[in-house]
Image (tube, grey):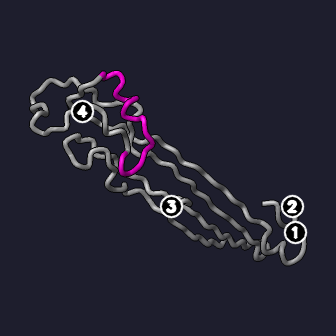
Amino acid sequence: MPFGRGRQFFQTGILNHILGGWQAAVTYEFQNGPLLSWGNLIYKGDINSFEADATSNTKMLDQWFNTNVPLEKVAGNQFAAFQTRVFPRYFNGLRADGMSQWNGNLLREIKLTEAVRFQFRVDAINLQNRSQMNAPDINPVSTNFGRVLSQTSSLNRFYQLQARIQF
C-alpha cells in the first residue's frame, strides 16, 4: 500500500504508524460447473439442436435450462432399464453451477525491537459470500424438472485472523 515511511503518502506522523506497512493480496477462483449427466431420454426433436434449445434462456434457480424442449414427460412412456442408449449423456453447454469466488488478505508486520517482530494477518475467503448451487433436476418426469433445489457444501464467507511473534 502507498502509505508510510518510504512511500508516497503519510511518511511521518501518526498516520504513518496506523496506515503504513500494510500489504494486501486478492485472488479470484473460477471453475466451470460439472456437465449435467443425462439419462437415456426420449427426445422428439432434432438431437443436434437440443443443446441450443435447452440453453436459450438465462440460468435461474427456478429454471436452470429451458424445460420446454420436446422430451417425453410421461412416466409410463419412458424406456425400460435394458433399452439401448440413444440419447447423449453430456452436452457441453449444459452445466451445473460453477465456482466463482474472490479471496483476499491483509498483512502488517511491526518491528517491536531490533530482533523481535509482530505480524498480524486477516484472511477473507469467499468475500462475496456466494453460495455454489447443486445441479438441477434433469428427470423430465419430475415436477422439479430444471430446478435447482439446494446448494453444495462449499464454504460460505470465512474470516481467519492470525498473530505471530518472530524472534
Using the image as rendered, state which of residue 157 and residue 40 is in the foreground: 40
- Amino acid type of disc 2? Arg
Q: What residue appears at the point 27 percent right and 35 percent down from the top-left corner?
A: 38
Q: Is residue 141 left or right of residue 93?
A: left
Residue 106 % position (x, y)? 66, 64
Using the image as rendered, state which of residue 119 and residue 165 is in the foreground: 119
Where, by quadrant of the figure, is residue 121 drawn? Answer: bottom right
Q: Is residue 148 left or right of residue 80?
A: right
Where disc 4 sits, the SS reads loop
- Amino acid type of disc 3? Asn
Marks 4 and 3, how far apart at CA: 36 Å
Marks 2 and 1, how far apart at CA: 8 Å
Residue 117 forms part of the magenta stretch:
no
Q: Earlier in the sequence, mark 1 or mark 3?
A: 1
Q: Earlier in the sequence, mark 2 or mark 4?
A: 2
Using the image as rendered, state which of residue 112 and residue 100 is in the foreground: 100
Around disc 2, counting alpha carbons within 10 Å, would you say few (fewer than 14), some (14 to 19), or many (20 or more)? Answer: few
- Amino acid type of disc 4? Leu
Using the image as rendered, state which of residue 95 and residue 3 is in the foreground: 95
Image disc number at residue 71: 4
Around disc 3, counting alpha carbons within 10 Å, would you say few (fewer than 14), some (14 to 19), or many (20 or more)? Answer: few
- Amino acid type of disc 1? Phe
Q: Please name which of the two marks, 4 or 1, marks the residue nearer to the observer.
A: 4
Cβ atoms under marks 2 and 1 closer than 8 Å: yes
Give the tally of numbered discs: 4
Q: Earlier in the sequence, mark 4 or mark 3?
A: 4
